[in-house]
Amino acid sequence: MEFYLDPAEKRNSPALLKLVQILCVLICVACVSVNADGRDRVTISISTTGLIRVDAELSAPARSWSFRNAYAGALGLAERVDEFQAFTPTGQDARAKKSATGEFQSEIDASRIVYLVRLSNPPVSDVPHASWLAEDRGFLMFADTLAVDTASVSAQFVVPAGWSVESSSTPDASGRYEVPAPEKSVFFLGRAFRKASKSVGGMMLQTVVNGSWRFNEDDALNAATEVMERYLALTGFRLPGKSVIMIAASPVALGNSIWKAETRGSSVVVLMDPAARSKNSLGQVRVIFTHELLHLWVPNSLKLEGDYDWFFEGFTLYTALRTALELKVINFEGFLTTLSGVYDVYSAHPDKLSLIEESERRWTSAGTQVYVKGILVAFLYDLMVRRESSGKTTLADRYRDLFNGGVTDKTDGNEAIIRLLGLSPASKDFVKSYVESSKEIELEQLLPAYGLQLDSSGKTSQLRVSPELNEDQKELLRSLGYRH
């Protein structure tokens, strides 16, 4: 834009001064309103030494920033943020200082922040719940690398030669990722990625594999397709956008675990112990998928509030076990053996809290009852509703109800799901006893009515079909998958 002054006005210093003042105001407004679309423009530069540099142009001036310090059992995340600086629209140092772990404040308004995040050598408790970088691969999760009040970002990555970036988001022509919900975003970075994709019932699914395994990306995609088709039928809900399954070697030894996984937003992260490359690794992946892929629906596609982990973990684990049985990943004997093993773990821990209370304390205590008691309660609930309906209704039907107008958005998850599960007087009393209250589960007394027996006389419990069954019990067990 050009401005022209006639000779007379050039000599009129007040008018010239006024024009200069207007131009200065316009320039300042343009600088402060860096991003009129309300999104922070973030550039993330990756170092193979386990270090990232974040350079963020803010959508609005700010003087304070906070970083998440804990997530899903991973602690001390904010301690990785280092060399934090803030700048004004004119590039002046805003004199930012660290006030506490993960807390930074500047003396004057800032429109740009720059800082480092050290992501090497993560403890085993952090993977796959937090960002990390290894020699040739890593995961970035904006929930622990960006300030917690970041509402929306336009992100660009600068990566080492030969590296690429994979995400459930699609970059634009300039390579920028528009991310409306940063806390749910996951980016897989590294070299030598192998990819496969397809449409599953109108839902886009992609697998991205890094590392050497006894399966390839197509094997993983086919295994995931089977599970996705089951869960689409289970819920009746078609996932929007693209879902991505990211498989890599864990950067640290996983101890007694063969794998760890997390589903966040539309991304499934599977980290496998490189020392545990068994011949049945594809079977392990199929088992992982039965649980993790259901999280794409529950809770990730639900808009419920509160801590209802007992349902989206415990009940989902049981539903995953049922899915593994239906897909013949396990047989009926394996189904019963898994449940008896879960009961042994449950029995070894005191049961003094309700499942709702256990969910609230999941990350501040051992938290095992959310899983093990949750599975057993789901199992008993499934048996009860099958018997009530002569096999016409199962727990699986309640998942369809979740996505078929059975619950409304922004309601309390515990209240909504308890109401959904308690559709009959008997089921309502059951949920009150085993979910809302802390009634102990005693399978030895409860299972005979369904044609099952639990033998706890040995070192490990044995769950078996009763030697004598009446016709109703036979019908119920057949509906579960029993074929004798």
Image (spheres, helix red, strand yellow):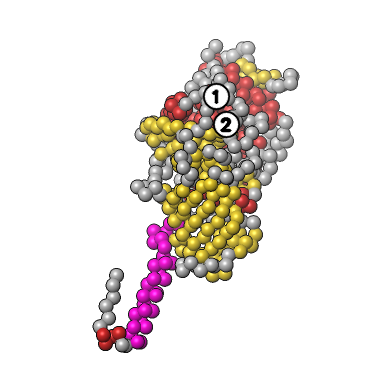
Instruction: Please say if the residues under marks 2 and 1 sit with CB atoms less than 8 Å apart.
Output: yes
Which of the pair 472/304 is nearer the observer?
304
The reply to whether residue 195 is in sight is yes
106 left or right, relative to 25: right
Q: Is 67 rendered above or below residue 364?
A: below
Q: Is 357 rendered above or below residue 153?
A: above
Give amino acid for label 1: Ser
Label 2: how many residues lie within 10 Å, few (<14), some (14-19) or many (20+)?
A: many
Which of the pair 90/476 is nearer the observer?
90
Q: Which residues are magenta?
A: 13-40
Gap in angstroms between the C-alphas marked 2 and 1:
9 Å
Determine which residue is flagged by label 1.
281
Determine which residue is flagged by label 2.
272
Whether residue 35 appears in magenta in the rendering, the answer is yes
* Label 1: which secondary element: helix
Q: Main secondary structure of the magenta part?
A: helix
Residue depicted at x 39% and y 67%: 30
Give amino acid for label 2: Met
